[in-house]
Amino acid sequence: MVIGYSHSKVQKHRVLSYNQLITFVLDCLDRLPIFSYSEVINQFAINQRIMAIITYNLITLNGVIKMITRQHTYQLAKRGKWVCPECGRKTFVCYVDTNGNVLDEGVGKCDRADKCAYHYPPRQYFADNEGVGVPRHHARATYKQTTPTPPSFIDNDIFQKSLNHYERNHLITFLNRVFGTVAVDKMIADYFIGTSHHWSGSTVFWQRDRFGRIHGGKIMQYNPDNGKRVKEPHNRITWVHSALKMPDYNLRQCLVGEH
């Protein structure tokens, strides 16, 4: 790749001051499609004229490039969440520069790796916007707008059938011994605690919203003697939709007791 410096110009500026060298490299960078530090290194590696000047002036190439490209380095923000353009949930982490400035609200990664997995990196953003020589805050993303997938709900019959057989429920039998049946019965009624047959004596905690819709149920097995969760030989915890093998179930949780 030839940037446009003639041999005579290279010879003329063989001995450069530190500031002159930086000015020279910056001028070269303006002519290159910069997406990452490694790509800048590759661009310089194939341009012998720039390499000759850098080498002759005994300036470490890596040090110069790192200093100049610090302002072009982007990483996922360590705080703050945005609405994901793919799934519509507020689980999106944007890419920010070294000063914490957001590159674009559509450039980032969704935290819901198992459900959404949307990722629009800076490299693709600049490629889509042909960002060579264009101020970064002027470019706009061209990511695909999609309609969020609606939440799934558990059938009310499944929910109602779980509200019995408390004599087999390990957690309930333990709580009855500690607090008495009156207090425990009130708790069951207030929070719609159910019994599951997925594991012997397991408990299901339903997530029911204020409209009466069942978003999901978390199944846990407890030790009837001490009231602690069973974690051996493995953690006994799962979801109702997983236990019932409901395909394409879109779990969108609500608060337990929201109803």
Image (cartoon, rainbow, N blue to C red):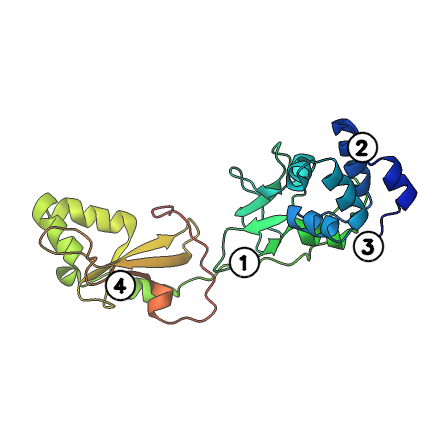
Residue 90 locus on image (x, y percent): 54, 46
**Is tag 3's residue or tag 2's residue first in the polypeptide sequence?**
3
Quickly name the residue at label 4.
162
Front: mark 4 or 3: 3
- Label 2 is placed on what type of residue? Val
Quickly name the residue at label 3.
1
Within 10 angstroms of label 2, few (less than 14), some, or many (20 or more) residues? some
Q: CA distance from mark 1 to mark 2?
A: 51 Å
Q: CA distance from mark 3 to mark 2?
A: 23 Å
Identified at 7% across, 49% down, the residue is: 177
Q: Is residue 136 visible?
A: no
Identified at 22% across, 47% down, the residue is: 187
Q: Nearer the viewer, residue 14 or 185?
A: 14
Q: Which mark is residue 100?
A: none
- Label 1 is placed on what type of residue? Ala
Residue 142 locus on image (x, y percent): 73, 53
Q: CA distance from mark 4 to mark 2?
A: 83 Å
Q: Nearer the viewer, residue 106 or 243?
A: 106
Q: Which mark is residue 15?
A: 2
Determine the secondary structure under disc 2.
loop
**Is tag 1's residue or tag 2's residue first in the polypeptide sequence?**
2
- Label 4 is placed on what type of residue? Ser
